[in-house]
Image: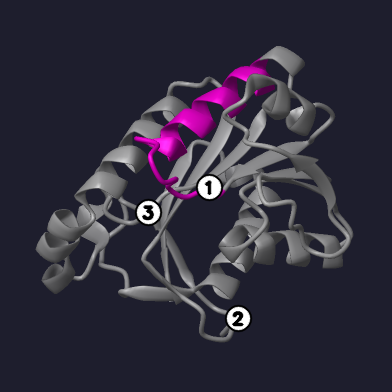
Amino acid sequence: MQITIVGGSKGTGAQLAALAIEAGHVVTVVTRSGTVPEGADRVLGSASDPAVARLAVTGADAVVVTVGGAKGVAHNRAAVTRAVIEQMKQVGVRRLLVQSALGAGESAQQMPLALRLPMKLVLAKPLADHEEQEAAVMASGLDWTIVRPSGLTDKPATGSWQAVETSEPGTLRGTIPRADLAACMLEVLEDDATIGSALGVSS
């Protein structure tokens, strides 16, 4: 596939880019810093800029959004995601994968009980951004999947994870290595059965 990753210069996005390149996919990374994983093509700028977003998604088979917050920008994740969705619609790209966070939407019930209230209090602003982001994704009409990881760590990959919808019973664990989340996201991209799903993900 030709995969565009918005937010692929570091963190989970960079690890996903590296895994996708290793698997034989062609990867384009949208980056404000100019840094991209080895082997990736680069689009310089912020995907909140319609011109940048359009250049980045044109010709893609799938688009992944892994952006975080930005200093001085309220709800940056939602703003970038809306801009990407609009340009995807204009150029006819349908497959969208978005990294949200466990606790957004109805997924609080998937968190360990002891973490539910602290997460809601400490991460209220990021979760509000993610909820606005998710609403835009779900209303997009695109072939979307949302992944909601639990707390991200930089521990080595374990090669295993849980990925479940809120309709499924049980709770998830409190953390997941970014490397495992990236591997999970690549599997999701390659599996059309995940379209229309919001998946909680943890170790």
Residue 88, quarter of the rendered image:
top right
Horizontal and vertical percent for residue 185? Answer: 60, 57
The CA distance from mark 1 to mark 2 is 24 Å
Q: Nearer the viewer, residue 121 or 88?
A: 121
Q: Is residue 136 above or below residue 188?
A: above
Horizontal and vertical percent for residue 200? Answer: 39, 57
Region rendered in magenta:
66-89
Give the secondary structure at mark 2: loop
Residue 156, quarter of the rendered image:
bottom right
Give the secondary structure at mark 1: loop
The CA distance from mark 3 to mark 2 is 20 Å
Question: In the image, what residue occupies the spot 31% across and 48% down?
Answer: 126
Badge 2 is on which residue? 159
Badge 1 is on which residue? 67
Horizontal and vertical percent for residue 32? Answer: 66, 45
Q: Earlier in the sequence, mark 3 or mark 2?
A: 3
Question: In the image, what residue occupies the spot 75% across and 66% down?
Answer: 19
Horizontal and vertical percent for residue 27? Answer: 81, 50
Badge 3 is on which residue? 101
